[in-house]
Amino acid sequence: MNQIIFHIDVNSAYLSWSSLKLLSEGSATDLRTIPSIVGGDIERRHGVVLAKSIPAKSYGIVTGEPVVNAVKKCPGLTIVSPEHAFYEKKSAELMQFLNDICPDTEQASIDECYMDFTSVSHLYPSAKEAAVSIKDSIYRLFGFTVNIGISDRKVLAKMASDFKKPNLVHTLYSHEIREKLWPLPVSSLFMCGRSSVDTLHKLGILTIGELAKTDSSILVSHLKSHGMLLWNYANGIDDSKVMSQPAKRKGVGNSVTLSRDVTKREEAAHTLLKLAESVGSHLRASHEAAGLVCLEIKYSSFQSVSHQMTLEIPSASTKVIYQTALSLFDAVWNRNPIRLLGIRTSRLVPEGEPVQLSLFDGQNSLAENEKQKKLDAALDAIREKHGADAVFRGSLLPFREQ
């Protein structure tokens, strides 16, 4: 029997979940029915759009654009701040429901998962009828909608779930790619970001079908190994399996109670860099990357605050963890003396897990990511061989304890 893979994706997850929370608190307005977004700072109109409603999309608002631009497009836009703790709760409820249906489930992010439906397919009249039943049950039980893509390949199931939305089921089996996939623009191909699209357009490649028929060596010469990946995906080539895993640790973190209260940003930044090195090295040692970074502060008054940020691309890079933590610190520090600082990471994924690039990721950022990985790996190797103090970053030198 050929494998049957579902890709289940919550429609505009953050927007849907925020709307449900507000409705449960007595709001008379469903955010999904009005021009609305999740993201940014409500008062200052800073930040980017994390999720949008269908009415907001009609104004040309897109995920990832600055909130200030979205407000210009739609002056009456409703903006709500993200509530990550609530999103985690809704995600956990959904994943538990899906695991009860089929244990061969792999969570890909907070709002999407793969399901190897093969082992339980005999319990249903057809895969599509089963998917429709799951989709409808999710809406009835939880109040939000999902799209489900069905295929015999993971990457094709992923792309099928991105077809027309919301609340729909689509198939994209290997034998359907010529009809359903190849006529689409290359921008619709999974992992084909803006930079890759620009390169392909310069080569005269506009559709996925044209990409699939292009000599792969030409793509490699212009896009390196990523070109080969895109060629494989365009041809429906993907041997990856759904990786259902037992319960594992939820995160990696470290904190330090300071020898004296810290009152200067430079001192706090120095401590955060050391913490980021510790957390990053532990992630790399376990061959994992984190999708979320959380900063913890305890003041001398023993009041505690925390703030977190989702990473566009899961990372184990010391630089990424440090810069994210410092950004969070700048956002929440009230200038009071600090007694403790901590960094926690969560949403762990296996190192090298394929991820979809954002609108703003190009070849330069990919090269920078690889450069940072090599630097971190070199430092880890030296410390493992010669000790933790054998090498340290120059930025730590002025504060190094005597």
Image (cartoon, rainbow, N blue to C red):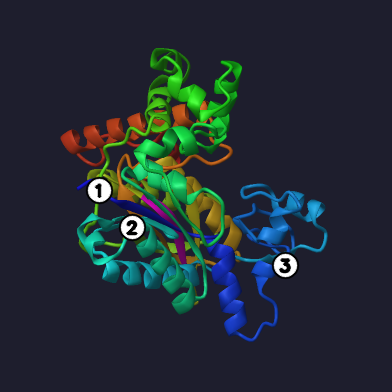
Q: Kindly identify which residue carries mark 1.
A: 3
Q: Given this view, does label 1 or label 3 mark the residue nearer the observer?
A: 1
| Residue 128 % position (x, y) | 38, 58
Residue 400: horizontal and vertical position, in percent? 38, 44
Query: How many numbered markers are drawn?
Result: 3
Q: Nearer the viewer, residue 191 or 149?
A: 149
Q: What is the span of residues highlighted in magenta in the rendered image?
A: 290-299
Q: Residues within 10 Å of mark 3 (few under 14, many from 20)?
A: some
Q: The residue tagged with tag 3: helix, strand or loop?
A: loop
Tag in front: 1 or 2: 2
Q: Amino acid at mark 2?
A: Ala
Q: Is residue 227 left or right of residue 240?
A: right
Q: Residues within 10 Å of mark 1 (few under 14, many from 20)?
A: some
Element assignment for label 1: loop
Image depth: mark 2 or mark 3 in front: 2
- Any mark on residue 127, and which? 2
Main secondary structure along the magenta-highlighted residues: strand
Distance between mark 2 and mark 3 Cα atoms = 34 Å
Q: Position of residue 11 (x, y in %)?
A: 53, 60
User: In the depicted view, which residue is nearer to us: 265 or 149?
Assistant: 149
Quarter-of-image position of residue 88 = bottom left
Look at the picture and state if 150 lies above or below 195.
Answer: below
Tell me the kind of residue under disc 1.
Gln
Query: Which residue is drawn at the image coordinates 32% and 71% (left, top)?
Result: 96
The disc placed on residue 34 is 3
In the displayed structure, 80 sits above or below 205; it is below
Foreground of the two, 322 or 355: 355
**As shown in the figure, which amino acid type bears the numbered disc 3?**
Ile
Q: Is residue 173 magenta?
A: no
